[in-house]
Image (cartoon, coloured by chain):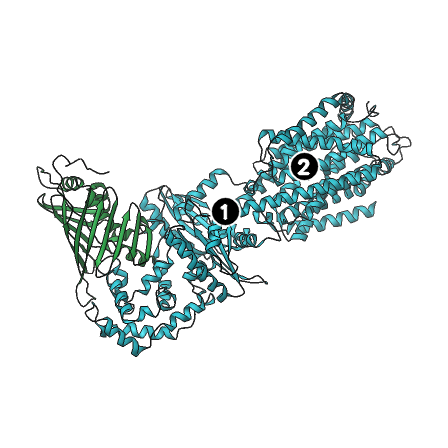
């Protein structure tokens, strides 16, 4: 016994150590598949490391327009200096001076207009005329100082191709909303989308640095994928704490009523605590991180683990037992009741082990957490409780009354057998008749409220950062290859744009053409003497005399020996960020990938049309994110259903093997199946959209319900003789166990976090029904009736 | 590079319109009377000749083409010589086309361009509110021969465009001159083609917006 205590304490310490050092996350990517299809791989790239996950949308509201624009200018400069953001854009262009110089110096590699024709005498004349047409207008302000170095206007052509058509409204030198009194900024955090701590730090700094402006009466609003993830994490943490406190308080009260002893209370929570710690530690060691939803699930473990303690404390306590030798109660419990609890544990494990083999890390975490937690809680009950409370809990509290009431109820319950049977049948019929309620989607896992989503949509429309809906993905083994593919695909998409089918698309090759294209442009540049001759022809009667264009000739000569630009040579310029948003470097055996984000406008575009247009571009994939996410979640749900089905089958096999009687097996399975059907039908009737977490809830119902059914089976058949232990004690322990579960899950059902809400909504009524139906469906004269 | 884009866009927009209806007014001729006069003209077409004097060029540059306008917010400038080029503004959307290339941007994302566009659009539609919001205005002359000087209120925009001077007779705009801070300027002379003077019945009824 003492050895068990020492082992337990050491294990507890180790688990606590791991738990304290665990990395907690809350992004939804854990709920995305591990072995994705090609389209899903693209999506995952985007969600995990894409720039989209690092984008922060910021609005400044309140005050006067002048105050807002002054704040935007000054504050953005401070944010840029903070080093927490890769870029902060607010429409203030003064920051782009260095970039302008870089682009200007590389214009002959980057301008899409550069080809042999452009440098013929005719091409030069036409290009010079075009440039000159900008002079004498506001455009001239920019063109004029560089006219003699860039008379063909390559700078202008570069700008044309690089700058987005959907720019925000600009007023007072900064971006402002078109619909609201608001200045807007767009920042990119340096911290990765999956680095929530880094993101949180950035947001905290962002808010803190806004304080002086808030003091002037301005208001800050922030949105973006990162803020959602950080807010979800905080919300989940907050709720889990709140629920844990409320749940604990309720359970402490119940235990007090049941045992009338603080000591019993303290002992009762040990298996739960052990289970939660073991669960978190195992998940942390297995996955390297713990998802917030998994953690939230921890409170639900209270459900089954508290039961173990209650069963032990009540059932091992037998005042009437002959020869009150110390430890007799524990020995008897281990002999008579532990096999039933153990069987209940095995059936629960069957359900949860199925989740472990899920292709979704988030679901697998739930499985690992539950399995490890339940095993630890059961072991603590079996080995630690007998050492601490050899004869169960001494106090009686109101248990006698509880036992008596439960006994009366149990005696009455079989009369409800047929009505409940009919109810079960009606539920089945209803389920067959109603459309399937299994239509929850991925978004239903997110605790983000409608207001936050609305703000996000508004800010997105303000800055023209529409959420990527349709992508074209290309991949190759190296940078040069994938950029060349992007150019091929771009040529096809240009045709769709010209036909008016597509509004436009973003491509990295506008900022970084493929090496082949750069080489072709370089080859199109004539050498000095030849260029001089052509200029002389082109400038006849022109607005610029040929002899003044020597700086142009010098620049072209310099460009002829310029090295090819690569992603690496852009490092440190704002172009790098922009390119990285569309070009994902290959690493760890993954190919280089380009993502072209399409602007389809309101009308959208059929994937078929795109695929047809892109036919012949090797490996081009069309990814429609909404559809893809939907397909992903359906696959997720399908897989989970399949696994739950297998788990249920395993439970039946296990029970059958133990009970060795079809009749008894039916008696155990019947109430659980009926309870599941009735809850399912009620939810369907209510119009609820069921998802993955409802399914997990049903697994829990089966896990917990099977314990009840087994105990009733034990009562009915008097397994193991059970000398001295009154049935009333078993009934009281079942009633108490059920009350704790119903209370803790009813609390979950009040949560604002969809994941917890879903589980609570299923488990609270499900377990209550399981107990009721188990009592009602007991066959023959219920021996347990007091 | 944004500056560049703005400049580029604004460049396409140094333009004009046509004139029309006459309306007699009492008292000193002011912006209220001028805009009322101009608002009576709902649409029109004209040809233009633009002369640009730019210090960095060795000679003045002449451009000619067509202009058209339709209330409340559409107008098009089409260069025919020396090269074909088209700038169309509809609402907040500015589209520039040359050969096969075409590019659209939101006008309000490029204040330097919108200052030119609004100078014209505001004048054409007689939109006093819009003109006064963006510019310091001064009107001289009479309905028979007026001149409107527009100076951007925003210092940032004054660095791009010093003044826009529009002059005309009655509801017809006949000349528009854009002066840059460095002294470069473009002067556009406008000859209405379809602009039949509106009769007294139409006068005043077209107070667009």
Residue behind mark 2: A698
**Residue A94: which quarter of the image?**
bottom left
State the residue in front, A699 or A222: A699
Q: Chain of mark 2?
A: A
For the question of whether residue A201 can be seen, the reply is: no
In screen coordinates, is A360 left or right of B129? right
Residue A144, position as x, y percentages in the image: 25, 64
Residue A782, position as x, y percentages in the image: 82, 24
The hue of chain B in the figure is green
Q: Quadrant of the N terminus of chain A?
A: top right
Residue behind mark 1: A227
**Residue A311: which quarter of the image?**
top right
Question: Which chain is represented by cyan in the image?
Answer: A
State the residue in front, A782 or A417: A417
Q: Chain of mark 1?
A: A
State the residue in front, A314 or B105: B105
Residue furthest bottom in the image: A529
Residue furthest right in the image: A323
Q: Write the residue at 42% across / 67% down.
A: A517
Residue A324 numbered tag: none
């Amino acid at each position: 016994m003492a050895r068990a205590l020492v082992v337990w304490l050491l294990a507890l310490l180790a688990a606590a150590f791991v738990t304290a050092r665990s990395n907690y996350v809350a992004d939804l990517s854990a709920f995305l598949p591990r072995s994705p299809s090609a389209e899903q791989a693209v999506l995952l790239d985007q969600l995990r490391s894409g720039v989209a996950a690092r984008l922060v949308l910021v609005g400044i509201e309140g005050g006067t327009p002048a105050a807002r624009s002054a704040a935007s200018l000054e504050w953005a400069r401070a944010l840029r200096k903070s080093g927490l953001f890769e870029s902060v854009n607010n429409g203030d262009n003064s920051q782009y001076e260095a970039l302008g110089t870089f682009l200007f110096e590389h214009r002959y590699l980057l301008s899409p207009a550069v080809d042999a024709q452009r440098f013929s005498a005719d091409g030069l004349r036409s290009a010079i005329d075009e440039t000159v047409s900008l002079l004498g207008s506001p455009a001239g302000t920019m063109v004029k100082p560089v006219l003699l170095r860039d008379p063909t206007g390559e700078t202008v052509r570069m700008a044309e191709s690089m700058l987005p058509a959907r720019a925000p409204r600009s007023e007072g030198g900064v971006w402002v909303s078109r619909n609201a009194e608001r200045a807007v900024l767009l920042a990119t955090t340096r911290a990765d989308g999956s680095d929530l701590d880094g993101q949180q730090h950035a947001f905290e700094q962002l808010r803190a640095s806004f304080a002086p402006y808030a003091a002037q009466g301005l208001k800050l609003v922030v949105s973006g994928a990162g803020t959602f993830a950080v807010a979800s994490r905080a919300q989940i943490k907050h709720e889990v704490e709140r629920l844990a406190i409320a749940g604990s308080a309720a359970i402490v009260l119940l235990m007090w009523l049941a045992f009338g002893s603080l000591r019993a209370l303290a002992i009762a929570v040990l298996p739960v605590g052990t289970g939660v710690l073991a669960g978190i530690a195992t998940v942390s060691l297995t996955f390297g991180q713990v998802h917030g939803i998994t953690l939230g699930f921890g409170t639900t473990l209270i459900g089954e683990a508290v039961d173990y303690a209650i069963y032990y404390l009540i059932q091992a306590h037998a005042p009437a037992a002959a020869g009150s030798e110390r430890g007799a109660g524990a020995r008897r419990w281990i002999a008579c009741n532990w096999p039933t609890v153990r069987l209940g544990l095995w059936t629960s494990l069957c359900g949860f082990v199925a989740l472990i083999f899920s292709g979704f890390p988030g679901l697998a975490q739930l499985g690992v957490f539950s399995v490890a937690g339940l095993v630890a809680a059961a072991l603590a009950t079996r080995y630690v409780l007998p050492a601490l409370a050899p004869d169960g809990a001494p106090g009686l509290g109101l248990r006698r009354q509880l036992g008596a009431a439960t006994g009366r109820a149990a005696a009455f319950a079989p009369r409800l057998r047929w009505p409940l049977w009919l109810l079960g049948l009606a539920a089945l019929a209803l389920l067959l008749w109603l459309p399937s309620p299994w239509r929850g989607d991925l978004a239903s896992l997110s605790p983000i409220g409608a207001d936050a989503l609305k703000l996000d949509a508004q800010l997105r429309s303000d800055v023209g950062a529409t959420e990527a809906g349709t992508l074209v993905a290309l991949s190759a083994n190296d940078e040069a290859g994938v950029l060349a593919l992007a150019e091929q695909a771009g040529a096809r998409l240009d045709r769709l744009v010209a036909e008016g089918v597509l509004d436009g698309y973003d491509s990295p090759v506008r900022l970084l053409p493929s090496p082949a294209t750069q080489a072709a442009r370089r080859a199109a540049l004539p050498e000095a003497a030849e260029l001089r001759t052509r200029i002389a022809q082109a400038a006849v009667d022109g607005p610029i005399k040929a002899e003044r264009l020597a700086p142009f000739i010098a620049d072209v000569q310099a460009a002829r020996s310029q090295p090819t630009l690569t992603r690496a040579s852009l490092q440190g310029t704002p172009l790098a960020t922009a390119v990285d948003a569309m070009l994902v470097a290959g690493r760890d055996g993954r190919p280089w990938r380009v993502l072209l984000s399409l602007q389809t406008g309101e009308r959208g575009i059929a994937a078929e049309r795109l695929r047809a247009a892109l036919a012949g571009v090797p490996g081009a994939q069309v990814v429609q994110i909404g559809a893809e996410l939907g397909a992903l979640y359906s696959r997720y749900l399908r897989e989970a259903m399949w696994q739950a089905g297998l788990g249920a089958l395993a439970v039946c096999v296990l029970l059958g093997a133990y009970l060795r009687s079809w009749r008894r097996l039916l008696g155990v399975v019947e109430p659980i199946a009926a309870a599941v059907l009735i809850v399912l039908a009620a939810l369907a009737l209510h119009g609820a959209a069921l998802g993955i977490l409802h399914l997990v809830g049903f697994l829990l119902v089966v896990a917990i319900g099977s314990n009840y059914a087994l105990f009733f089976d034990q009562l009915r058949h008097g397994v193991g003789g059970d000398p001295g232990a009154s049935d009333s004690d078993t009934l009281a322990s079942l009633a108490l166990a059920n009350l704790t579960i119903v209370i803790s899950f009813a609390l979950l059902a009040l949560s604002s976090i969809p994941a917890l809400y879903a589980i609570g909504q299923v488990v609270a009524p499900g377990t209550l029904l399981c107990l009721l139906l188990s009592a009602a469906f007991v066959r023959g004269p219920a021996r347990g009736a007091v | 590079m944004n500056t560049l884009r703005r400049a580029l866009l604004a460049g396409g927009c140094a333009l004009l319109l046509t004139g029309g209806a006459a309306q007699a007014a009492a008292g000193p001729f002011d912006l209220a009377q001028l805009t009322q006069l101009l608002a009576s003209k709902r649409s029109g077409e004209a040809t233009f000749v633009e002369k640009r004097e730019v210090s960095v060029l060795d000679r003045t540059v002449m451009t000619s083409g067509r202009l058209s306008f339709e209330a409340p917010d559409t107008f098009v400038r089409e260069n025919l010589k020396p090269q074909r080029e088209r700038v169309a503004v509809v609402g907040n959307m500015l589209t520039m086309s040359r050969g096969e290339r075409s590019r659209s941007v939101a006008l309000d994302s490029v204040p330097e361009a919108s200052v030119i566009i609004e100078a014209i659009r505001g004048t054409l539609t007689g939109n006093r509110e819009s003109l006064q919001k963006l510019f310091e205005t001064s009107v001289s002359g009479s309905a028979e021969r007026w001149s409107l000087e527009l100076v951007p209120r925003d210092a940032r925009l004054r660095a791009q465009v010093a003044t826009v001077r529009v002059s005309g007779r009655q509801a017809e705009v006949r000349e528009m001159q854009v002066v840059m801070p460095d002294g470069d300027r473009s002067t556009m002379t406008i000859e209405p083609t379809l602009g039949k003077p509106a009769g007294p019945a139409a006068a005043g009824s077209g107070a667009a917006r």
